[in-house]
Image (spheres, rainbow, N blue to C red):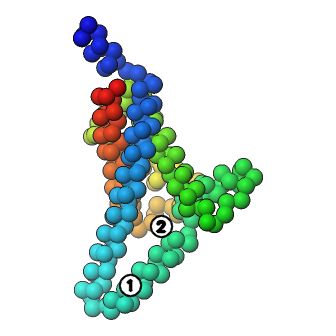
């Protein structure tokens, strides 16, 4: 009886893969978002410290950082561009005040979908979990961020993006992949 339960529990199950993958995808996207906020804040502090060490006035640094933040807020990121394109395809106008929310919805939908794909793949081909999900996060970074997003003109070509931005986004995707596998494997043990 215990042997049958053990076999049934460890047999690949696509439905279990979808459920654990969707849940883990939502959680991993949330964790990735928080990591990106933290790393952006850390980058800002580090840049300020370097400029202070070069004897730049603090007021000038703060003004530059505020202007940079305002400029970044005015620019559409890739998820906002996707949201706008979806709205246009649906015959709708995406209002400026809703653009950030719509972009976040696109980001979470994509992270959830990638989680579902990962969950099903982990059930059928457990090798995908190699590196605790970090290899999947790296693959996702390369395929989506470095190839698909620029190919669909949602961002500048990779050669026009600073190396530090590539590294920051890669690290965020590694965090996504690791979080995805951690949550998925914990949920799978419960199911």
Q: Residue furthest top?
A: 1
Q: Residue at x 75, y 52 (%)?
A: 91
Horizontally, residue 109 falls left or right of residue 90, namely left
Location of residue 13 in the rendering, given as x and y in whole percent from the top left corner:
41, 21
**Residue carrying label 2:** 160
Work out whether residue 169 can be spotted: yes
Q: Residue furthest right?
A: 91
Location of residue 146 in the rendering, given as x and y in whole percent from the top left corner:
46, 54
Residue nearer the viewer, 53 or 191: 191
> Which element type, helix, strand or loop, lies under badge 2?
helix
Query: Can you tell which quarter of the image residue 10 is in?
Result: top left
Q: Residue at x 39, y 45 (%)?
A: 27
**Residue carrying label 1:** 62
Mark 1 surroundings within 10 Å by alpha-carbon count, few (fewer than 14), some (14 through 19), many (20 or more):
few
The residue mark sitting in front, 1 or 2, is 1
Above or below, 163 against 46 in this view is: above
Where's the N terminus, which quadrant?
A: top left
């Amino acid at each position: 009886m215990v042997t049958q339960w053990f076999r049934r529990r460890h047999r690949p199950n696509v439905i279990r893969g979808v459920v654990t993958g969707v849940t883990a995808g939502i959680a991993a996207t949330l964790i990735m978002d928080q990591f990106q906020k933290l790393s952006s804040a850390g980058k800002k502090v580090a840049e300020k410290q370097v400029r202070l060490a070069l004897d730049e006035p603090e007021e000038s640094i703060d003004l530059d950082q505020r202007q940079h933040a305002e400029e970044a807020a005015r620019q559409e990121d890739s998820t906002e561009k996707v949201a706008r394109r979806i709205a246009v395809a649906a015959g709708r106008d995406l209002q400026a005040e809703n653009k950030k929310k719509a972009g976040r919805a696109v980001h979470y939908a994509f992270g959830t979908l990638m989680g579902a794909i990962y969950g099903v793949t982990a059930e059928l081909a457990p090798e995908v979990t190699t590196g605790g999900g970090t290899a999947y996060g790296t693959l996702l970074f390369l395929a989506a961020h470095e190839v698909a997003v620029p190919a669909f003109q949602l961002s500048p070509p990779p050669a026009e993006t600073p190396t530090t931005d590539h590294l920051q986004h890669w690290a965020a995707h590694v965090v996504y992949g690791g979080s995805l596998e951690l949550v998925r494997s914990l949920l799978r043990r419960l199911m």
